[in-house]
Amino acid sequence: MTRVTFVVLAVVATGCLGLADGVIDDRSDAGPALSGGGSASGTGGGGASGGAAPSAGGSAARGAPDAGRPGTDAGVTFDAGAAVDAGADPCATVRCSANASCRTTPTRCECNPGFVADGGSCFAGDPGVPALRSEAQVCAGYAEGYRSRVTGADFIAGPSMCDVGTLTRAAIDDALARLNFHRWLAGLGPVNDSAAQNANAQACSVISAWNPAGVAAHSPQPSATCYSAQGAAGAGSSNIAWGSADAADAVDQWMIDRGNDTTFGHRRWFLYPSLDDVGLGFFRGGNNYGSASCAAVFGAGNMGPNPPWFPFPPAGYSPISIARWTWSVHGAIPQSGATAVVTRLSDNATLPVRVDVMQGGYGRLAAVTLVRMGWEPAAGQRYRVVLDGPAGPRREWETAPIACP
């Protein structure tokens, strides 16, 4: 198994802390390729690239609704031969397709709540609540978030050493889909990209690739190799990772956040409900770990769900490769004196965990991590988690790792 060395470094608005090195496997043994963790700075931050919002884990509908035929509603049909009763109950003689019901004024068939129309039938749709999703929906989202859209080069080098090169649109879309899958899994809305932030992050990446890793990377001086004012501005507002295989791989690197044990700030910015308008850059080359990636995460204004609290991995199903990452809980949660009890429901075994309270200021939500003490989650098992503290509030959920194809 090939092993690569990488490091990541994050910033917040007030600055950054230290840096540590790490070694990781560059592929996961279960599921699609993951970056696997790696060492991180002592700060948080976190961020991602842009692109059109993917359908990461969306509904199970298999095509565009057919809304153009008489006697249908968004492609949902009456049974052949059904007649509409013109009396007091127009729906009395109407028979709708499976998972649909008759509605009046005008008389028509509509998909039941939780289902979406497709070609005359109703299929289970994404309920938007992680705990209500099916295994198939989660695995479909996983496949969409991790599939490659790149058919040629993901990064095209420029003619000179300091040319920022080009991170292709497909590579940006891959990274955005990866980020949006993690947000969807947590029950949050997708983010969009900003061309201006992408450009700043790309300029940041070339400076980071050619100069030493560390906290100074956020404040490159004019004497730095391949310095540019745009790159320096990007470095001052981005998280930075070194040694990623590609732009999407860097997203997992920030999500895993290994070595960032006191803040988990990269993940917390990724999972900040209001996050929007992100940017991502990636440069392959340089003299630092073979690549560098910068991510801008200070955009806001997302109008998607804003739950008061949420765990990651979430309540409900999650791919086993992600369930093996450190568990975190975000938002309105107990912190002072917090304890957690994890029960494996198949045998009611209590599994030991340690609750670590994360430092504030990252993603603007409080957070704790649940550090497993000598055990790992397994696909096919279900775990009940109870997080509580003297001052509350008590939080309880069940999570179920699954092996997605």
Image (cartoon, rainbow, N blue to C red):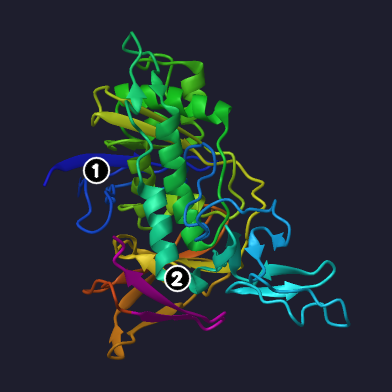
Front in this rendered view, residue 374 or 212: 374
Q: Residue at x 56, y 59 (%)?
A: 365
The image position of residue 239, as x and y in percent, is: 43, 39
- In this view, the residue farthest toward the front is 81
The image position of residue 273, as x and y in percent, is: 58, 55
Q: Residue at x 37, y 22 (%)?
A: 206
Distance of mark 1 from mark 2, alpha carbons?
A: 39 Å
* 398 drawn magenta: yes
- For marks 1 and 2, the one nearer the N-term is 1
The image position of residue 357, as x and y in percent, is: 44, 66
Please give the count of numbered marks on the rendered protein: 2
Q: Is residue 329 above or below residue 255?
A: below
Give left or right: position of 287 versus 226: left
Residue 317 picture quarter: bottom left
Front in this rendered view, residue 174 or 386: 174
Question: Mark 1 sits on what residue?
Answer: 21
Q: Is residue 153 visible?
A: yes
Q: Which amino acid type is marked by label 1?
A: Asp
- In this view, the residue farthest toward the bottom is 348
- In this view, the residue farthest toward the top is 159
Range of the magenta residues?
382-405
Q: Quadrant of the C terminus?
A: bottom left
Q: Residue at x 40, y 43 (%)?
A: 17
Q: Is residue 335 visible?
A: no
Check disc 2 and report its element: helix, strand or loop. Answer: loop
Q: Is residue 184 above or below residue 86?
A: above
Residue 376 picture quarter: bottom left
Q: Is residue 295 above or below residue 199?
A: below
Question: Mark 2 sits on what residue?
Answer: 134
Q: Residue at x 33, y 46 (%)?
A: 40
